[in-house]
Structures are given as C-alpha cells and as structure tokens.
Image (tube, grey):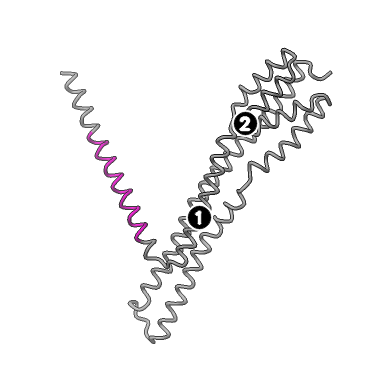
Amino acid sequence: MRKLIVLCGVFFMAAYFGAFDAAAQEASSSGFQTLKEKFIEGDWKFMSLVLITLILGLAFCIERIITLNIATANTDKLLSRIDESLANGDMEGAKEIAKSTPGPAASVLYEGLRSSAGGPEAVEKAIVSYGSVQMGLLEKGLVWISLFIAIAPMLGFMGTVIGMIGAFDKIEAVGDISPAIVAGGIKVALLTTVFGLIVAIILQILYNYIVSKIDGIVNKMEDSSIGLVDIMARNNVFK
C-alpha cells in the first residue's frame, strides 16, 4: 500500500512538472513569436542598426567569456606544483610548470620566477609590471561592449524622435489630428526605443558578468603572487 501511494505521488509530481514545463515552453515560444512580430513591424532602417549593434555586442561578449574561461586556472594547484619543484631545488622545472600552464596568473608567476636572481624586490617588481600587462589583456574589448550598450538605446530614441517628426508631418499635411493618421507612425517609432532598450539590457548583463569574471581572475593573480614570494622565501631561493 505504501509503495502504491509513493508511486501515485511520483506520477502526479511528474505530471505536474511536465505540464509546468510544457506551459513554460509554450509561453517562451509565444513570447519569442511576439518579439519577432514587433521587430518586423518596426522601421527596418533603425531596427537594422539596433540588430547590428546586438550582433556586434554579443560577438565581443562571447569572445571575452570564452577567453576568460580559458584563462581561469587552479592557482592553488599551480603553486603547490611550483613549491614541490623549488623544494627539490629545481628552478627550471618550476619555470616550466608556470610557462606550460595557460592563464594570466601562470604568466605572472613565470615572470616572478625569472626575476628570482634579483631578490624579493625584483620579483615583486616583475609581478606588478607584468600584472598590469595582463590586466590590459583581460579588459581587451570591454570598451567596445560599453559603446554598444550606450549606442543601442540612443539608436532607439533617434528612431522614435524621427518617427514622431514624421507623424507631425502627416498631421500638418492632412490638417487633422485624428489618431488613425498618426497611430501607425507613433507605434513604429516607439518600437525602436523598446528594442534599443532590450539590446542594452542584454549587453549590460553580459558586461557585468565579464567584469565580475575579470575581478575574480585578478584576485587570484594577486593571491598567487603573494604566495609565490612566500614559497620562494621558504625554499631559500633568495640568497
């Protein structure tokens, strides 16, 4: 009897979540269809510019996300391997480990190991200098994403203003302020603003994700740099 109750409960839960999932998919499909219809109803001249902004912005965002995911390395494991090599007196092996590991943190550690002959001051100076270079590489392309975030709503507003000017031109030509005369033009004008804002929101979310990803990598770089100096001092690299 208990098994029968459990099976019934599982059945009803599966049916409920299946219906919920189907409803969610239908709502998503309906929302996308509505969005597509409204996009087609807008003025193609400004809608095309907004679409180009979205495509270019997404291209830069995807490139940055892929690059940053590749650049993310397990710095704790890397420092542990370097520590083992230095404990065995194998400086060249430690350099090879840092050199063969992808990511900015490993590159910074490699520059620090290369400067070990100059003492801790030289190591810290090399880490700071090369860390600035890596920061520039991590932030590459962010200025373009910021540009597209700013341009998208501007293009939408421009389409709206030009559309409103056209609507008032119709009023002037006809000599009547009947809503039927200008409703279509105003609707098209406002749609450009809506889609410009949608593009800006999408790119802004991705931009914030990229910035948070960069902050995480930079924190790992700083922590690993401090750890490297401690490891080198503990293994009597500085003489």
Please rate how many residues cluster around mark 2, counting C-alpha atoms within 10 Å: few if below 14, some from 14 to 19, many from 20: few
* Residue ID for mark 1: 200
Say which residue appears at 63% left-offset and 31% top-offset: 220
The amino acid on which the numbered mark 1 sits, given as a three-letter code, is: Ala
Say which residue appears at 77% left-offset and 19% top-offset: 233
The C terminus: image quadrant? top right
Viewed as shown, does residue 101 lie left or right of 90? left
Looking at the picture, does residue 81 appear above or below residue 212? above
Looking at the rendered image, the disc whose residue lies closer to the viewer, 2 or 1, is 2
Real-space CA distance between mark 2 and mark 1, rounded to the nearest whole angstrom: 33 Å
Q: Secondary structure at mark 2?
A: loop
Looking at the picture, does residue 215 appear above or below residue 189? above
Magenta span: predominant SS is helix
The count of marks equals: 2
Viewed as shown, does residue 198 lie left or right of 239? left
Please rate how many residues cluster around mark 1, counting C-alpha atoms within 10 Å: few if below 14, some from 14 to 19, many from 20: many
The N terminus: image quadrant? top left
Q: Is residue 146 magenta?
A: no
Viewed as shown, does residue 9 lie left or right of 30? left
In primary-sequence order, the first of circles 2 and 1 is 2
Q: Which mark is residue 128?
A: none
Residue 164 point in image, percent of width and height: 45, 74
The amino acid on which the numbered mark 2 sits, given as a three-letter code, is: Pro
Between 66 and 214, the one lying in front of the other is 66
Q: Secondary structure at mark 1?
A: helix
Residue 42 point in image, percent of width and height: 40, 66
* Residue ID for mark 2: 102
Q: Is residue 34 magenta?
A: yes
Magenta-tinted stretch: 15-37
Residue 45 point in image, percent of width and height: 46, 67
Viewed as shown, does residue 202 lie left or right of 223? left
